[in-house]
Amino acid sequence: MSKKIKLYDATKCTACRGCQLACKQWNDLPACQTENRGSYQNPQSLNPNTWLLLRFDEIDAGADGVKWIFRKDSCMHCSDAACVKACPSGALTHTQYGTVAHDQKKCIGCKSCVTVCPFKVPQYDSEIEKVAKCDMCFSRLKNNLEPACVKTCPTGALQFDDENKMNQVIKKRLTALKGKAHLYGDKFVGGTHMLYILPEQPAYYTGLPLNPKVPASLAGWKNWLKPLNLLALDTKEDT
């Protein structure tokens, strides 16, 4: 099974937020009360009922004053995923597509993934005492459908395909932009299956870490303690 890549090309994004709405519709996520804070960004951050958020930032545009820049904020689906390593119940796993799926039925609400994710993606729901996050529309992928956010994007800012094909798309797009854009996501945490083409330096985008890493403390947990914990959980279920 070929690994998949989802590309967000911010140079094509109009911030229509169709992807944000499509995510809610497909995953049957309820709307939440929002508040005007002087920005089109709403809500202000990811939450258990918002797995995809269009972030808006204002930056200095010199003589032109300020300008808006946009970023799609959701799970980056890391190849070396801290959340998968930390999860003691097997609720977070890598799929055959390279993405990170989340089985909420197995989630025990320990919040380990919330603590270790360098992108601050997993969100704890205190009402049900479980965690929620984007799973790249795993139910759609299994039926040869692209993610809902990609399906609804009107400008081609979101694209999804096999890893090899998307690498060619990215290479061609970066060449066309003649050095005026930056690729983000390919050089850390084993490479992410959600990649960005950004018209500005990553440092300008709120909440985007410049050097995301898997905590070193997870090495011993993955190799020794986690397997024992999973075995204990399996034994408990059998009894």
Image (cartoon, grey):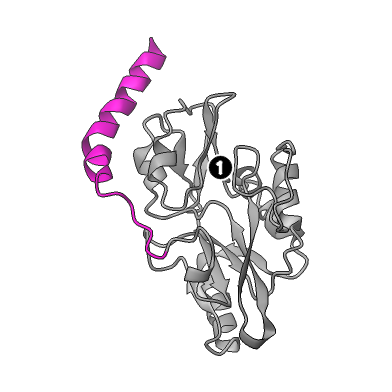
What amino acid is at disc 1?
Lys
| Residue at image location 48% in from the left, 48% down from the top | 120
Q: Is residue 166 above or below residue 110?
A: below
Residue 138 located within the stretch drawn in magenta: no
Left of 128 or right of it: where is 153?
Answer: right
Range shown magenta? 210-239
Q: Quadrant of residue 197?
A: bottom right
| Residue at image location 63% in from the left, 47% down from the top | 137
Q: Which residue is mark 1?
A: 133
Left of 22 or right of it: where is 173?
Answer: left
Q: Is residue 154 above or below residue 47?
A: below
Does the rendering let one see residue 164?
A: no
Q: Quadrant of residue 55?
A: bottom right
| Residue at image location 40% in from the left, 29% down from the top | 89
Frontmost residue, 121 versus 237: 121
Q: Position of residue 102 (x, y in %)?
A: 52, 38
